[in-house]
């Protein structure tokens, strides 16, 4: 059985770790990325089930990640989240 890989794209390491912990408890494998460039590399090397992406990144934003998934012909669902000033992640609805 193939494991479900979830990419967590955020420059906020605290938010990355919190989300990774939740995914781990759910039995999902997480792969961290801090930039769009790192995300592009991961997409080319792994099968990804979903991407959790911070709204803003050091080298762009979630729309750039959406463009990457389209260019890679890999329609991976992307969930965007906001990181509050205290560093905790909150989902957008």
Image (cartoon, rainbow, N blue to C red):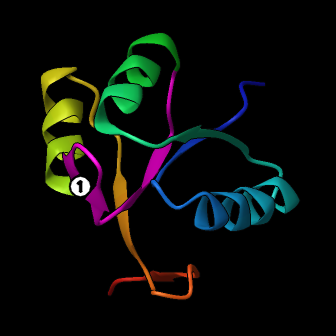
Point out residue 17 in the picture as x, y percentages from the top left corner.
Answer: 71, 59
SS at circle 1: helix
Is 92 above or below relative to 32? below
Point out residue 43 in the picture as x, y percentages from the top left corner.
Answer: 40, 23
Q: Residue 66: which quarter of the image? A: top left
State the residue in front, 92 or 14.
14
Is 48 above or below relative to 43? below
Residue drawn at (50%, 32%) of the image: 48
Point out residue 84 in the picture as x, y percentages from the top left corner.
Answer: 45, 86
| Residue positioned most to the top | 45
Q: Main secondary structure of the magenta part?
A: strand
Point out residue 68 in the picture as x, y percentages from the top left corner.
Answer: 20, 31
Residue 10 is a magenta residue: no
Which residue is under mark 1?
Answer: 62
Residue 49 is a magenta residue: yes
Q: Range of the magenta residues? A: 47-61
State the residue in front, 58 or 55.
58
Residue drawn at (46%, 87%) of the image: 85
Is 79 above or below relative to 85? above
Residue drawn at (29%, 49%) of the image: 58
């Amino acid at each position: 059985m193939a494991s479900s890989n979830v990419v967590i794209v955020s420059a906020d390491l605290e938010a990355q770790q919190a989300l990774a912990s939740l995914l781990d408890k759910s039995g999902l494998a997480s792969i961290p990325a801090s930039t769009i460039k790192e995300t592009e590399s991961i997409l080319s090397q792994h099968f990804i089930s979903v991407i959790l992406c911070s709204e803003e990144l050091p080298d762009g934003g979630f729309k750039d990640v959406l463009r990457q998934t389209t260019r890679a012909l890999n329609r991976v669902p992307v969930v965007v989240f906001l990181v509050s000033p205290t560093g905790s992640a909150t989902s957008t609805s």
